[in-house]
Amino acid sequence: MTGKVILFHPPYDGPPLGPPLSLLSLASPLVHAGMSVSIVDGSIEPDFKSVLAREIRDAVCLGISLLTGRMILCAIDVAQFVRQLRPEVPIIFGGWHPSLLPEQTLKEDRVDIVARGQGERTLFETVIQLQEKKSLESVQGISFKAEGRSIHNPDRPVENINNFPPPAFEMGNFEAYEQVTGVRKLPYASSLGCPYACHYCTDQVFYNRRFNAYTAARVVAEVTDLVSRYRLTDVALLDSNFPVNVKRAVEIASGFIQSGIKFRWTFQASTDLLCRMTDDEVRMLAESGVAHMGFGTESASEEVLQLMNKKHQRIDEMFETARKASVAGIRVTFNLILGYPGETERDRLDTFRTMTQISRMYSNVRFSPNIFTPYPGIPIWPQLREMGVKEPQSLEEWADVSLGSNHLPWLQGEDLRRLSEMLQYFMLDTRRSLLTGQELNRGLQEVC
């Protein structure tokens, strides 16, 4: 099958983890069908417009994957650039942000099609229809423009990810990413979805709280093969909550050990799931190469956790998670949200005190606090509107909504000054290294 599909990944703040997994996943079914696919990653290609100008000459379409935040501005700029070069080439926006706000995204003049939700099958079918110049009305999971109006086709049911071929890792230029980051790292997702319903999170909107995972055998086989084939040193699991199935997580770690392939790997989890593991199982994680675990603890105030609908989480699990990881020799980062609707200054101080206590006890623990960001699609938006949060009214306006930005009317003036004083002591510094327990304790004494 002939025809070229161009997939573009806008650059974002900070160094890339590695080849963009979203685009490698989208490319895989196309490549298996014999189509020509070109991936252009703005994170490592400084002159990406020149590359796009060359590749777009014989393209069937341009697909751009983006998240909320500054990536949007680059995506719009690239769409305009391509539109001027080849106005007849359809431009498809996909990824988390367009999926959550397809109608608003389609109002952007330079966007022709929005691919919503799980994209592998959706993009493949869309490309087929475009090549054969057929109607798009049969393609589930897309929104598109026709005769001056927006058409939203039915959603595509979420498919078992074991049905898809592996992402097209052969298209990932690991050497180029190593030159930028100094590390040969593989971004890999062994699962999608999370069973929890936290009010600040969009994951439940995408995956309906269903855990959609590769089998343990597939994960072990694919990861060890990729590490060996591309001489990789690190693997970053991008799962929303890796150990939802604890038995599966342990089987994966055991499989890595039995393979004899050595590499470091990291994952994100919730503390309640890590606490279901025995100390020996956590040690097995370390033996398999786990070097770091990140946890979305978000607060150390019971009241705020209730507001967040984090009914599955307890404060004592932070201490137990830190202990288990410390015994195993694994580094831990607890991610925190500050300024959540309904949070008081006392709640914040409770969180900072817990940070100090844990840091005193365990040297392997770090904290990453950030001001609450009202991302699109989160279940708490009705309350946010009542509290005066202004929801962006266009795709371009959402570019200002990014991690660390402050769009909260209740966190201004004196309240913001007080929080800023606290964050002087407790936030990541400019080099992204975190404060020690001694510094945390000193900061708490000075602020309080």
Image: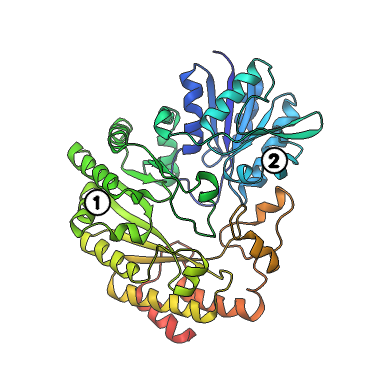
Q: Earlier in the sequence, mark 1 or mark 2?
A: 2
Q: Which residue is rendered at x = 55% and y = 25% of the image? A: 124
Q: Position of residue 428 (x, y in %)?
A: 46, 66
Query: In the image, which disc is placed on residue 285?
Result: 1
Residue at the far right: name it: 148
Amino acid type of the residue that numbered disc 2 sits on in the rendered structure: Asp
Query: In the image, which disc is placed on residue 141?
Result: none
Q: Which residue is rendered at x = 41% and y = 45% of the image? A: 211
Q: Position of residue 434 (x, y in %)?
A: 41, 66
Circles 1 and 2, Cβ within 8 Å, touching? The answer is: no
The answer to which of 438 and 295 lies nearer the viewer is 295
Q: Position of residue 331 (x, y in %)?
A: 31, 60
- From the viewer's perspective, is residue 118 above or below residue 428? above
Quadrant location of residue 192? top left
Q: Which residue is rendered at x = 48% and y = 24% of the image? A: 29
Query: In the image, which disc is placed on residue 77?
Result: 2
- From the viewer's perspective, is residue 16 above or below residue 339? above
The total number of labels drawn is: 2
Say which element carries label 2: helix
